[in-house]
């Protein structure tokens, strides 16, 4: 008798249609966390999740913002997700309330579940709304920067526990924002390359590299 290989559980979870269970908040869509937990438990009744603690607290305050982390175990496989505490426009909240932290933990839980397949397409952009630009200029992709290595954010958080990283100055921030506007650079892609969540978190060591890249874009467009 020939044994049939067991189907990859990720494939099974990724095949579940979650489009009818999305919730819209502001301009973004989110998968309902009660639905995600329900589907996960129906799929694997032994599935568990853990909210990571930092010195006993369910969140980690840093100069980059406040972060939460949730690890989800499905069929013996544990995957962890880090999530910043954000407002309704996906901007970091510097002084989050207990409600803000709890909301981010729920979002982080859903994203950790998505790492196992359920609703992953939402975060790949398939179900995100198209946002019209208010400018006639196309948004320029970022060139000249190497993508941030996997785990850079986690490493940055660990470093923040040990020392206070020196960030860019207010004048440098204003100049970078001015260059981004003038060159119509994709800000989200720029942040992705840097492994950061906002421009205010650019380390001083990266400032010159970012400015030179944007200035080269400006010269190309001239």
Image (tube, rainbow, N blue to C red):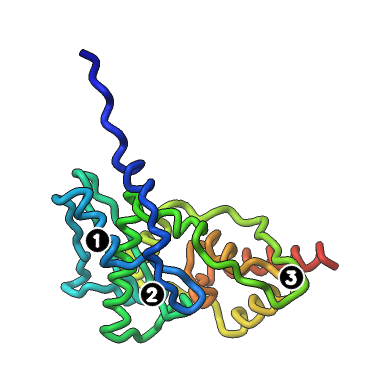
| Location of mark 1 (residue) | 37
Label 2, label 3: how far apart the Cα atoms are: 32 Å
Quadrant of the image containing the C terminus: bottom right
| Location of mark 3 (residue) | 183
The residue closer to the viewer here, 84 or 218, is 84
Place residue 214 in its image quadrant.
Answer: bottom right
The residue closer to the viewer here, 148 or 187, is 187
Q: Identify the element where label 1 is drawn.
A: helix
Residue count near mark 1 (Cα–Cα under 10 Å), binned few <14, some 14–19, many ≥20: some
Vertically, is 74 above or below 6?
Answer: below
Does residue 206 appear left or right of residue 41 in this picture?
Answer: right
Mark nearer the N terminus (1 vs 3): 1
Mark nearer the N terminus (2 vs 1): 1
Q: Where in the figure is residue 212, as x and y percent of width and height?
A: 69, 65
Q: Identify the element where label 3 is drawn.
A: helix
Q: Where in the figure is residue 71, as x and y percent of width and height?
A: 25, 58
Mark nearer the N terminus (2 vs 3): 2
Mark number for residue 164? 2
Residue at 34% x, 63% y: name it: 82
Does residue 72 appear left or right of residue 128 in this picture?
Answer: left
Q: Where in the figure is residue 57, as x and y percent of width and height?
A: 20, 75
Quadrant of the image containing the N terminus: top left
The mark closer to the camera, 1 or 3, is: 1
């Amino acid at each position: 008798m020939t044994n049939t290989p067991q189907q990859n559980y990720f494939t099974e979870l990724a095949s579940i249609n979650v489009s009818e269970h999305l919730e819209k908040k502001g301009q973004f869509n989110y998968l309902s966390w009660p639905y995600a937990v329900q589907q996960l438990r129906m799929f694997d009744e032994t599935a568990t999740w853990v909210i990571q603690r930092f010195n006993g607290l369910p969140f980690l305050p840093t100069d980059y913002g406040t972060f939460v982390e949730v690890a989800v175990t499905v069929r013996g496989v544990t995957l962890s997700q880090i999530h910043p505490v954000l407002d309704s426009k996906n901007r970091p909240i510097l002084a989050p309330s207990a409600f803000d932290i709890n909301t981010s933990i729920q979002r982080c839980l859903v994203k950790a579940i998505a790492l196992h397949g359920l609703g992953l397409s939402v975060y790949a952009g398939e179900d995100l709304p198209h946002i019209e630009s208010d400018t006639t200029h196309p948004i320029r992709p970022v060139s000249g920067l190497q993508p941030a290595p996997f785990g850079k954010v986690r490493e940055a958080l660990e470093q923040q526990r040990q020392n206070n990283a020196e960030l860019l100055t207010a004048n440098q921030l204003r100049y970078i924002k001015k260059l981004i506007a003038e060159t119509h650079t994709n800000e989200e892609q720029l942040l992705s390359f840097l492994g950061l969540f906002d421009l205010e978190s650019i380390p001083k060591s990266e400032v010159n590299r970012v400015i030179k890249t944007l200035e080269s874009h400006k010269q190309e467009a001239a």
